[in-house]
Amino acid sequence: MSVSLLELSNGRVSLEFDEADIPTVALAIRTLFGEATQKRFPTAAEVRFGGANFAFQNEWKDPCLVSETPLGNQCLQAVCAWIHRETEEC
């Protein structure tokens, strides 16, 4: 399992993980915020949970969730912290 937060130059946060970690990330989101909604596009998806929107990308089998707001940053930090507590990652 490889889950990490990457701070972006625009002040946003990206939750980076492996494809094998998708079920764990989804479980963390459901546990903390309830079911996420998503709108799919050809190369990405817009995901909403915790009152915030995120871009989900999975290029070259390297998925990530990117926050669009400061609230989204906090949500991704909470997801990473939950995964760390549950799996000793992040």
Image (tube, grey):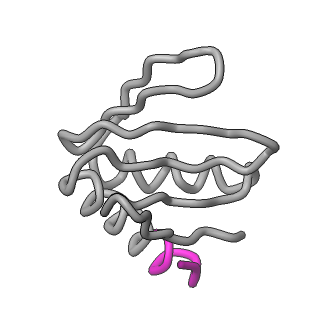
Q: Residue at x 59, y 60 (%)?
A: 16
Was residue 89 drawn as part of the magenta stretch in this picture? yes
Q: In the image, which residues are magenta? A: 83-90
Left/right placement of residue 54 relative to residue 83 reads left
Left/right placement of residue 82 relative to residue 40 reads left
**Quick one: which residue is furthest to the right in this view?**
60
Give the answer, above or below, for where 40 lies relative to 24: above
**Image quarter of residue 46:** top left
**Image quarter of residue 70:** bottom left
Q: Residue at x 37, y 26 (%)?
A: 37
How many dots with numbers?
0
Q: Position of residue 24 (x, y in %)?
A: 58, 56
Q: Position of residue 44 (x, y in %)?
A: 58, 27
Left/right placement of residue 61 relative to residue 76 reads right
Q: Residue at x 49, y 78 (%)?
A: 84
Q: Position of residue 36 (x, y in %)?
A: 37, 33
Is the N terminus in the top left, top right, bottom left or bottom right quadrant?
A: bottom right
**Image quarter of residue 41:** top right
Give the answer, above or below, for where 15 lies relative to 84: above
**Quick one: which residue is furthest to the front in this view?**
9
Q: Position of residue 45 (x, y in %)?
A: 51, 26
Give the answer, above or below, for where 12 lies relative to 66: below
From the viewer's side, name the closer residue of 41 and 90.
Answer: 41
Left/right placement of residue 56 relative to residue 28 reads right
